[in-house]
Image (tube, rainbow, N blue to C red):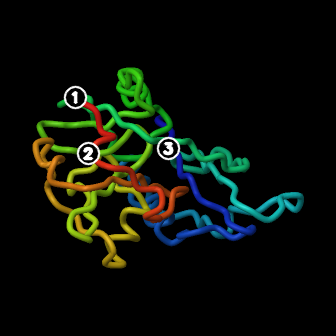
Amino acid sequence: MCHLLETIKIVNRQPVNLDLHQRRVAKSRKELFHAKDDFDLSRLISVPENMGEGVYKCRVTYGLQVEKIEFEPYLPRQINTLKLVFDDEISYPHKFADRSGLNRLFELRGDCDDVLVVKKGLVTDTSFSNILFLKKGQWYTSDKPLLEGTKREFLIKSGLVFPMKIHVSDLGNFEKFMLVNAMLDFDENRAHGIINICI
């Protein structure tokens, strides 16, 4: 049986966006395992007594049932440059523990920090995050991501980001990009110039 992951941000001992994580877990379990029940992440995630304030990563490994729950301090990766890689067959519709396809593409990054995956001419995601693009004061994201991230969903529902079809040929029309995922918040100070995406 395949295993899935749910990565949840813990800030000052409190889980962030837990309702969106709960919804994704329920959707994945129903689609992959035909589960007729739900497990409650809010009851299962018990922050350790010795875990202090600050930002931590909670990793839930599950299938039909929860396999394990782990906590670790969060150390963000420094991503400044992206390498365009092309793969028309890559598929990552659920947050699978098996990331071999994404890892294979990551190895193609060359001198860049990460990759930006293009599938059938359309921009999707990096190897570990969704990506946003700035144009004339408005942020956009691909309407064809490899994975529909919880932070991406939150930003779309909040009206801060709009999904759109982004062809690789459109990249030059944008000014900046920003990476977001469950651990990486929307913060324009983290944005980089579009020139940092390398062909």
Q: In this rendering, which labeled residue sits more in front, label 1 or label 3?
A: 1
Calculate the distance from the C-alpha at mark 1 to the C-alpha at mark 2.
10 Å
Q: What residue is at 23 percent from the left and 55 percent from the top?
A: 142
Calculate the distance from the C-alpha at mark 3 to the C-alpha at mark 2.
20 Å
> Vertically, is 130 above or below 108?
below
Q: Could you classify mark 2 by the number of other residues whose Cα lies within 10 Å: few (under 14), some (14-19), or many (20 or more)?
A: many
Q: Helix, strand or loop at disc 2?
A: strand
N-terminal-most mark, 1 or 2: 1
> Vertically, is 190 above or below 1?
below
Q: Is residue 70 left or right of residue 102?
A: right
Query: Residue farthest to the right?
Result: 50
Would you name the residue on which mark 2 appears?
A: 124
Q: How many numbered tags mark residues here?
A: 3
Would you name the residue on which mark 3 appears?
A: 4
**Identity of the amino acid at label 1?**
Asp
Depth check, front residue: 22 or 37? 22
List x then y, in percent, for residue 157: 34, 76
**Identity of the amino acid at label 3?**
Leu
Would you name the residue on which mark 1 appears?
A: 87
Q: Quadrant of the C terminus?
A: top left
List x then y, in percent, for residue 6: 53, 52
List x then y, in percent, for residue 51: 83, 58
Q: Helix, strand or loop at disc 1?
A: loop
List x then y, in percent, for residue 161: 30, 69
Q: Could you classify mark 3 by the number of other residues whose Cα lies within 10 Å: few (under 14), some (14-19), or many (20 or more)?
A: many
N-terminal-most mark, 1 or 3: 3
Q: What residue is at 73 percent from the left and 49 percent from the top?
A: 73
Q: What residue is at 72 percent from the left and 47 percent from the top?
A: 72
**Observer able to see residue 92:** yes
**Identity of the amino acid at label 2?**
Thr
Depth check, front residue: 91 or 175? 175
